[in-house]
Amino acid sequence: MTYVNERDPEKINRIQRRHSYHIMDEENKRNISLTTYFVWGTLLTFVTVQIIVTESRVLVQLAIRNGLPFISVNNFQHRK
């Protein structure tokens, strides 16, 4: 768990907190890396980005928490 403290008002879009998790998928015997970014925008837009990386796919979820619809891209095929 890493906290980035930047008080510079010139940096409008900055990462406030970053949470990284490493999960072992017991069923498929593979590692899952989950990183969640909390980003603050100009209009106090709360954006949550979750990226799950496995051996065969990349799952990206983007949620904008200011009344806009939830945007989700599932089962995005990652080409090695």
Image (spheres, grey):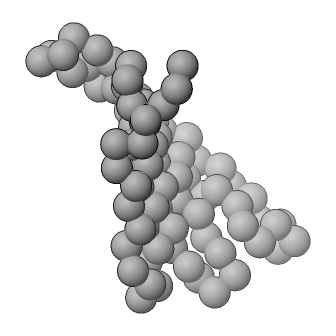
Q: Is residue 30 above or below residue 1?
A: above
Q: Is residue 16 above or below residue 60?
A: below
- The residue furthest right is 10
Residue 78 percent location from the top left of the image: 48, 31
Number of residue marks: 0
* 6 relative position to 32: left or right: right
Q: Is residue 70 above or below residue 66?
A: above
Q: Nearer the viewer, residue 26 or 11?
A: 26
Q: Is residue 66 above or below residue 36?
A: below
Residue 22 in view (yes/no) = no
Q: Quadrant of the C terminus?
A: top right
Task: Examine the image and state in which quarter residue 32 appears.
Answer: top left
Q: Nearer the viewer, residue 22 or 70?
A: 70
* 44 relative position to 75: left or right: right
Q: Residue at x 33, y 18 (%)?
A: 31
Residue 64 in view (yes/no) = yes
Residue 36 percent location from the top left of the image: 46, 48
Q: Residue at x 18, y 16 (%)?
A: 28
Task: Examine the image and state in which quarter residue 22 appears.
Answer: top left
- The residue furthest top is 29
Q: Residue at x 51, y 67 (%)?
A: 47
Residue 8 percent location from the top left of the image: 83, 66
Q: Nearer the viewer, residue 79 or 46?
A: 79
Residue 6 percent location from the top left of the image: 74, 59
Q: Residue at x 61, y 70 (%)?
A: 40
